[in-house]
Amino acid sequence: MMRAWILPTLFAACGVLVAASLFARGLPGTAVPLLLFFALLAGLHSPLAFPRSIGSAEARRRSAVDGRPVVYWRAGCKYCLRLRFRLGRDARRLHWVDIWHDPDGAAVVRAAADGNETVPTVVVAGRPHVNPDAAWVRAQLSRST
């Protein structure tokens, strides 16, 4: 879906506009760092900052086999981004489902959060946990292996 790319595109466009304005005024020393900053923001808020997403049904199947938690997320969510970076390398061991790309995943999240699409929602052993602490998620991950 394209809406996952709206925020990163806006960050990139703003960066280009601000940098172009500063270059036109003869301030390349200020323009380049600002352009890099906006490019960083665009990258962090894009789906590229997260491990590859799979479908909700496949994530549940894999979780049943290996016991690893399933994380339901969406691009542009600062809480999802915070969880992703606090997990560090351990994030790659989880099963990630982008609710904007998977209607079944969005339904799981709505069922767990009283009809709201509150993410990140982490499902461990069939029980959903809305916006859990990264240390708790890491502990659940260590129990599964």
Image: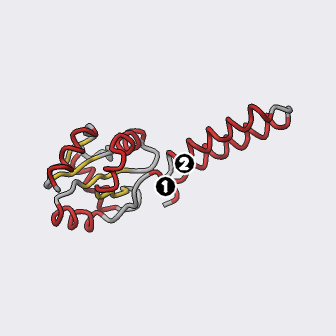
The three-letter code of the residue at mark 2 reads Gly
User: Which numbered disc covers residue 70?
Assistant: none
The three-letter code of the residue at mark 1 reads Leu
Residue 119 image-quadrant placement: top left
> Can you give x and y, in whole percent of width and height, for residue 140 in the image?
18, 47
- Tell me if 131 is positioned left or right of 77 in this view: left
- Tell me if 131 is positioned left or right of 44 in this view: left
Q: Which residue is mark 2?
A: 43
Residue 20 image-quadrant placement: top right
User: Which numbered disc covers residue 48?
Assistant: 1
Residue 10 image-quadrant placement: top right
- Could you say which is closer to the camera, residue 122 or residue 51? 51
Disc 1 on helix, strand or loop? helix
Residue at 57% x, 43% y is 40
Disc 2 on helix, strand or loop? helix
Quadrant of the frame with the C terminus: bottom left
> Can you give x and y, in whole percent of width and height, for residue 41 in the image?
56, 41
- Could you say which is closer to the camera, residue 48 or residue 107? 48
Tally of numbered tags: 2
Residue at 14% x, 55% y is 126
> Can you give x and y, in whole percent of width and height, for residue 42 in the image?
57, 46
Mark closest to the chain's N terminus, 2 or 1: 2
